[in-house]
């Protein structure tokens, strides 16, 4: 086994922009680059390996060859590859939406639910997003406000800044606002229930599908219960700093500000490294390669790698 350098599938959802092409140099023939799935084994788009003996294969194919040991002991509780990591460029606002929990999603959709974490990589001045409700409301009021188009009056609209963090449990109403670039770590699921799409038309010229009944089933009509914004304990390791972004039974995410050298690896879990800024050199078992802004690296469980450089790295594992 060896560290895999990954090429992401790029999605051209109508609200997306071009920063993933211009700032992160992701290759796509599509005019819009809304999302880059930088770590994905999902059926709707898997990464392609671009280094080493497995160059050209999907990460799913490589993991089938390597077996469960590549994911580590922590993954044994999952019946599927557990996480999906994205870069999201919202040039325009996303729909107001919600994700179901595992039990509901498995019974209704046949896949697991979605809890996720957002890290704001960048945003325009005055950008906002929706995170839960201003106050607790009843399901009946939630339904009424959807029908009479006053839902945004009771949503919790939050001004955002670069570096902010939001942990979004399944059942939390949310929407990324326009002018926000986000790194998202989430469960490996693509199930989303749209509550409102502001009357926009899809590529077919028709309004995009809403999922009101399902959203009514799963939405928690409450104020945010968790802290958000510029949160996360910061520790130092030599010249490097490590900021805790999120930790739950689904995934762990940290932000590494790399100024020198650091050893990365865990015998119990695989590790994902996503470069948000800068460049690094990665060395493992005498082999070496470089990575730049936007590059995503999968480190199999039990493998130790040395990274060095000047970079901001999103570190994720389970």
Image (cartoon, rainbow, N blue to C red):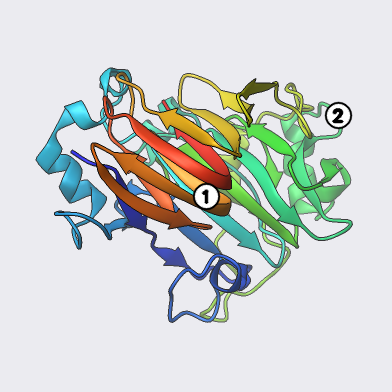
Q: Residue at x 88, y 46 (%)?
A: 153
The residue at which mark 2 appears reads as: 135
Left/right placement of residue 153 relative to residue 19 reads: right
Q: Secondary structure at mark 2?
A: loop
Q: Is residue 202 above or below residue 66?
A: below
Q: The N terminus is located in which quarter?
A: top left
Closer to the camera, 216 or 198? Answer: 198
Q: Is residue 87 above or below residue 73?
A: below
Residue 176 in sight in this render: no
Left/right placement of residue 151 relative to residue 92 reads: right
Query: Whole-percent x and y of residue 77?
Result: 30, 19
* Alpha carbon distance from label 1 to label 2: 37 Å
Query: Whole-percent x and y of residue 2?
Result: 23, 41
Q: Residue at x 72, y 31 (%)?
A: 139
Q: Residue at x 38, y 41 (%)?
A: 109
Q: How many numbered marks appear? A: 2
Point out which mark residue 275 bears: 1
Point out which mark residue 220 bears: none
Q: Is residue 208 above or below residue 98?
A: below
Residue 265 occupies quadrant: top left
Q: Secondary structure at mark 1?
A: strand
């Amino acid at each position: 086994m060896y560290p895999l350098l990954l090429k992401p599938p790029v999605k051209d959802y109508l609200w997306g922009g071009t920063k993933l092409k211009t700032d992160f140099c992701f290759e796509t023939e599509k005019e819009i680059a809304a999302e880059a799935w930088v770590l994905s084994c999902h059926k709707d788009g898997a990464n392609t390996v671009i280094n080493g003996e497995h160059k050209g294969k999907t990460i799913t194919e490589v993991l089938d060859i390597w077996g469960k040991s590549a994911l580590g002991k922590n993954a044994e509780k999952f019946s599927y590859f557990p996480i999906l990591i994205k870069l999201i460029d919202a040039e325009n606002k996303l729909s107001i939406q919600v994700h179901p929990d595992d039990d509901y999603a498995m019974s209704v959709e046949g896949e697991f639910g979605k809890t996720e974490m957002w890290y704001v990589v960048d945003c325009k001045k005055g950008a906002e997003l929706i995170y839960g409700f201003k106050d607790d409301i009843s399901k009946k009021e939630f339904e009424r406000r959807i029908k009479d188009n006053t839902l945004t009056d009771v949503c919790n609209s939050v001004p955002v800044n670069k570096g902010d963090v939001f942990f979004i449990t399944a059942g939390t109403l949310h929407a990324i606002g326009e002018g926000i670039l986000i790194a998202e770590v989430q469960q490996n699921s693509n199930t989303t229930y749209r509550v409102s799409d502001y009357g926009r038309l899809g590529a077919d010229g028709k309004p995009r599908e809403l999922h009101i009944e399902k959203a009514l089933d799963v939405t928690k009509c409450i104020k945010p219960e968790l802290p958000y914004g510029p949160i996360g304990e910061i520790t130092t390791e030599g010249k490097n700093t490590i900021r805790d972004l999120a930790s739950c039974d689904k995934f762990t995410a940290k932000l590494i500000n790399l100024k020198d050298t650091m050893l990365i690896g865990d015998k119990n879990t695989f590790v994902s490294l996503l470069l948000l800024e800068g460049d690094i050199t990665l060395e493992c078992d005498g082999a070496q390669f470089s990575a730049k802004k936007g590059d995503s690296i999968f480190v199999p469980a039990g493998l130790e790698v040395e990274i060095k450089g000047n970079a901001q790295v999103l570190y994720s594992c389970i």
